Image: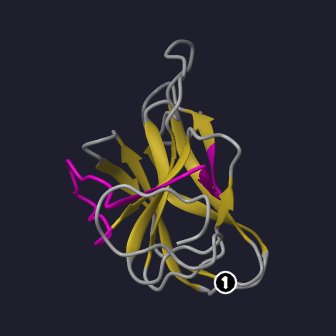
Amino acid sequence: MAAGAATAGPAGSASQEPGLTPDGPATIRAFFNGPSTLEGRPPEVLVRWGLTVLPGGNGGAVRLQVLNGSPGVRVVGSSPGVQLPAEAGTYEFDLPWGIPYDPRQHGLAIEQETGGHQLLEPSERPEDEVHLFRPPLADDAQGATATQTLTSRRLRITGVTETDLDGDLVGD
């Protein structure tokens, strides 16, 4: 395991390279384990997501999963699979349908098939965590617990939201 990566729970070891996702099938979630405010946000819908890849990793099939809760994780939405290139760059993917999203309650994750993607980065904040779930979470998963936690790490994933006041899962 890479220096500076703390783990909790059972399951396989993380990749030797600190920026690589672990080999094999897994769900990998970005998680902020710190304070947040509960007021002031209108309903939103996730319409696009992106990943930033650094040099030195593998390409492969991935898809977005939106998770709610910790512990006791539930999958609230997912995207179709996409082919993530190994080449460094920022890649964005449109969602064919909106997913209800509130960053105070939901977390973005990827489900990977092969692993070894260059998507993780160190963080100065101990509240930044990456949660690993093995086997990967099914779309109807409820009550799941991470099999491994990497502290002071971030998953380079982003989401683009639009306001959805009428709740039709299409941005207003």
Task: Indicate the position of residue 169 as horizontal and vertical percent values.
Answer: 45, 41
**Span shown in magenta:** 134-160
Q: Where does the C terminus fall, quadrant-wise?
A: top right
Residue on which disc 1 sits: 57
State which quadrant residue 71 falls in: top left
- Residue farthest top in this picture: 39
State which quadrant residue 133 falls in: bottom left
Task: Indicate the position of residue 30 as horizontal and vertical percent values.
Answer: 52, 51
Instruction: Assess whether residue 20 is covered by the magenta stretch.
Output: no
Task: Indicate the position of residue 69 as horizontal and vertical percent values.
Answer: 33, 39
Identify the coloring: secondary structure
Kind of residue at disc 1: Gly
* Front in this rendered view, residue 111 or 54: 54
Q: Is residue 43 above or below residue 80?
A: above
The residue positioned 61% from the left and 57% from the top of the image is: 49
Task: Indicate the position of residue 161 as horizontal and vertical percent values.
Answer: 61, 41
- Residue farthest front in this picture: 3
Helix, strand or loop at mark 1: loop
